[in-house]
Amino acid sequence: MKFFLAFPETMRNTEGPELLPLHWRFFLYGLLGFATEVCFTAGWEFVVNLNFKFPGNTSLWSFVIYGTSLLICERVRQYLLDRDVPLLARAFVYTVWAFTWEFCWGMILTSLGWNAWDYTPFDYDVMGIITLEYTPAWYVGSIFTDLFIIPYTMSLCWKPKGEKATSEPIVNGCVKPKSG
């Protein structure tokens, strides 16, 4: 379990404030996923049905699903980067992961009677829990996540209590403290 909850030394900024704690990264990823899902479903509704009201929807479960998924993707990304896996191959791994994660959560929620989503109207649905029609969107979203979302979230810092704002230079997204 420590694998997912702690940073290896290669990912830790040891010269300044600590990186954003796990629970705050979970919150940011969950919030981003929640908002993205609402915007995506609104856009999909427009493209498919020409609905100019742009009604977006999601489930509150998407907050938890995206939050945990992207925390795991942080680790997967670092693992793949350490092995020099190219971006397009990493995006493929993330896309497979997204479908796997959504399917697992869908099975759990369905077994509890909490059907959060239903893809049965889609041509390429799998048990109504996932739809392969979203593959291009997941793939492009995975590239964006790898290039921007995870790196920028990982560069955010947690300012220790009592530390005042400074005009010191920023190193790796964190303010480098004065030496001496």
Image: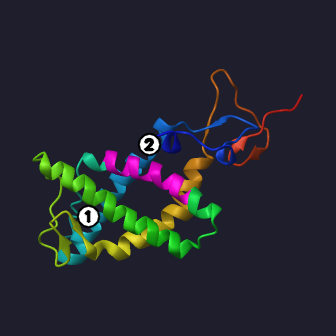
Horizontal and vertical percent position of residue 138? 38, 69
Q: Main secondary structure of the magenta part?
A: helix
| Residue 164 falls left or right of residue 35 | right
Q: Is residue 50 visible?
A: no
Residue drawn at (27%, 74%) of the image: 132
| Residue 112 falls left or right of residue 169 | left
Disc 2 + disc 1, Cβ < 8 Å: no
Horizontal and vertical percent position of residue 163? 69, 25
Looking at the rendered structure, the kind of residue marked 2 is: Phe
Looking at the rendered structure, the kind of residue marked 1 is: Thr
Q: Quadrant of the C terminus?
A: top right
Residue 59, compared with residue 157, is above or below; it is: below
Q: Which residues are magenta?
A: 63-77
| Residue 155 falls left or right of residue 75 | right
Residue found at the very far left of the displayed protein: 113
Residue drawn at (30%, 72%) of the image: 134
Q: Which secondary structure, mark 2?
A: helix
Q: What whole-number distance in Å separates the C-alpha atoms at marks 2 and 1?
A: 22 Å
What residue is pinned by disc 2? 26
Is residue 46 or residue 84 the one in the foreground?
Answer: 84
Residue drawn at (45%, 72%) of the image: 92
As for residue 70 lying within the magenta part, the answer is yes
Q: Which secondary structure, mark 1?
A: helix
What residue is pinned by disc 1? 41
